[in-house]
Amino acid sequence: MRSCYLLPVAAVLLGLFSLITQVSFAQGPGNSQNSQAVAVLFENVRIFDGVSDNLSAPSNVLVVGNAIQAIDTRPLPMPADIGVARISGAGRVLMPGLIDAHTHLFMETSTQEDLIAATTAPERLFQRSQENANAMLMRGFTSARDLAGPVFELKRAIDRGDVVGPRIWPSGAMISQTSGHGDFRELSELPRTPTSELSLAEQFGVGAIADGVDEVLRRTREQLMLGASQIKLAAGGGVASEFDPIDVAQYTEAELRAAVDAAEDWNTYVTVHAYTPRAIQKAIRAGVKCIEHGQLIDEETARMIAENDVWLSPQPFLDDEDANPYPEGTENRAKQLMVATGTDRAYNLAKQYNIKTAWGTDNLFNPQGSARQGAKLAKLVRWYTPAEVLRMATSTNASLLALSGPRNPYPGKLGVVEEGALADLLLVNGNPLENIRLIEDPEANFLVIMKNGVMYKNRLS
C-alpha cells in the first residue's frame, strides 16, 4: 500500500506529465492542411474489401463525411448540395487502412537510454510519440492497439485534431507482478516498502506493479478510469525485461481472474503477455480473451486456445533484420533466439487449429524498426497468402478491436470497404494481392491515405 505522503506526489507527477503532453501536442502540425470537400468520389478503382480473396470489378466509391456512402460498378449520382472531390483511380487498388494490433507508440522510437534520461527532459519523449503517431499514419496504418505506455493524452490530441495520427485503442500501463515482465526496477530499488517512491516506469505510466487480488483490482480499475479500451497484464516472462526468465509463469489464477472480472464489469477484456504453455493455459482458465505472442505454445495449448475461442496475437519474430537489438551473449539475446525459434511452430499451430489470429509489430526501443512496419506485415507471406495477410491486418484485426465493446472509442465498422463502414482507406499504386511488397514502401505506393473521411495524403490531386 502506498503511504498517504506519496499520494500527493503521484498526483503532482500525473499533472506534470499531462501538462507536458498537452503543451507538446498543442505544438503539433494539426490537420488544418487537410481541409477538403465534404464528399470524395474514388472513380475506377478495384477494391480489396478486407474480406475477399480477389479484387472487385472496376468500381466507384463515394465517401460522404466520415463514412462510405455508396459503392457501385455504375456511375454514382453525386450529392447536389455539397462539394465533391473526384479521384481518378485509373484501375488502382482501393483497400481498408491497415491496423497494427500490438504497438507501443511511446516506447518504440525511444531507446532505453532515452527513457533513463527522461527525468531531465521528459517532454522530448512525448514529442517523439507524437512524431511516431504521425509517421505511422503516413505508413498507411490508420488504427493501432497500444499495449503499454502513456498514450492517453496522445490519443485525445489525435481525436481532437491537434495531432495527426492513427486511431488508438490504449491499454495504459501494463500491469505486472513484482519481478514480472512489467517490473522495470533495478535490484537496488528493492525491497519496496510502504514509503517507497514509484519507479520511473510507474511514474510514466509504462508499467503498474500489483501483487495480490486487491492490488490487481485497483490497478485494473485505475487504467479503466484513465481511459483504457482493454487491459493488459504480464502473465509470463519476457525478452526485453531483465529479471524474469522467459519460462516463468506470472500471476496466480485468482489474480488474473480479478483483472478479468474488473474488465468484464466495464464490458471489455484482458489480454496478456505470455509465451509458454503454462502461462497461456492459466490465463485462459482465468477468462483472458487474447494472448500476446505465444511463440512457445505446444499442441495441447493451441487446442485449448481454439476450444475457448481465445484470440492469439503473435508477431513474426525471427532472427533477422527486424529483431529488436540486443548484444550477443546477453540473457536478452538468448531469450530472443528462443522466441524466434518458436515462431514457425506457433503460426503453423494457429493455422492447424484455425485459431483467431491477429497481427502486430511490438517494436520496442528501435526507431529504425518502427519505419519497417509494412515490411513486418509483408513478412507473413512465409505462412499466409497475400490476401490472408491483408485480411489479417484489416478486417480480422478490426474484429479484435471491437472486442472492447462499449469501451471501443470509435463506434463504427472498420477494416472493410463496404457501404456504411468508416472511411479509413488506402489507394495503392499497384495490386498488393499480386505483390505484397508494395506495402513495404508506403511513401511511393500509397497514393491516397484517408482516415475518418479526411485525406492526409493525396498524390493524385
Image: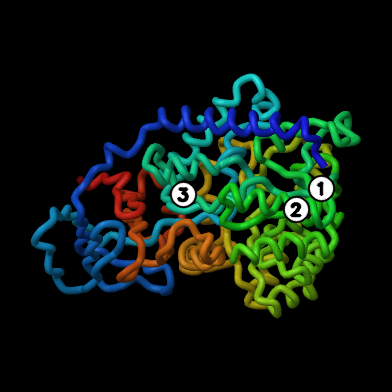
Q: Residue furthest right?
A: 191
- Confirm or deny contact between disc 3 and disc 1 (CB under 8 A): no
Q: Is residue 25 left or right of residue 277?
A: left
- Confirm or deny contact between disc 2 and disc 3 (CB under 8 A): no
Q: Which residue is located at x 50 percent, y 40 percent? A: 154
Q: Is residue 160 above or below residue 65?
A: above
Q: CA distance from mark 3 to mark 1?
A: 35 Å
Q: Which image quadrant is residue 264 in?
A: bottom right
Q: Secondary structure at mark 2?
A: strand
Q: Which residue is mark 1?
A: 180
Question: If the image is split into quadrants, where does the C terminus sit?
Answer: top left
Q: Which residue is located at x 69 percent, y 58 percent? A: 293
Q: Is residue 78 above or below residue 222?
A: below
- Confirm or deny contact between disc 1 and disc 2 (CB under 8 A): yes
Q: Is residue 433 visible?
A: no
Q: Which amino acid, by three-letter code, is at mark 2?
A: Ala
Q: CA distance from mark 2 to mark 3?
A: 31 Å
- Circle number at residue 8: none
Q: Which residue is mark 2?
A: 234
Find residue 92 and report its horizontal and vertical position in percent.
28, 59
Q: Which image quadrant is residue 282 in?
A: bottom right
Nearer the observer, 284 or 316:
284
Q: Nearer the viewer, mark 3 or mark 1?
A: 1
Q: CA distance from mark 1 to mark 2?
A: 7 Å
Which of the two labelled residues, at mark 3 and mark 1, occupies the earlier sequence position?
1
Q: Secondary structure at mark 3?
A: helix
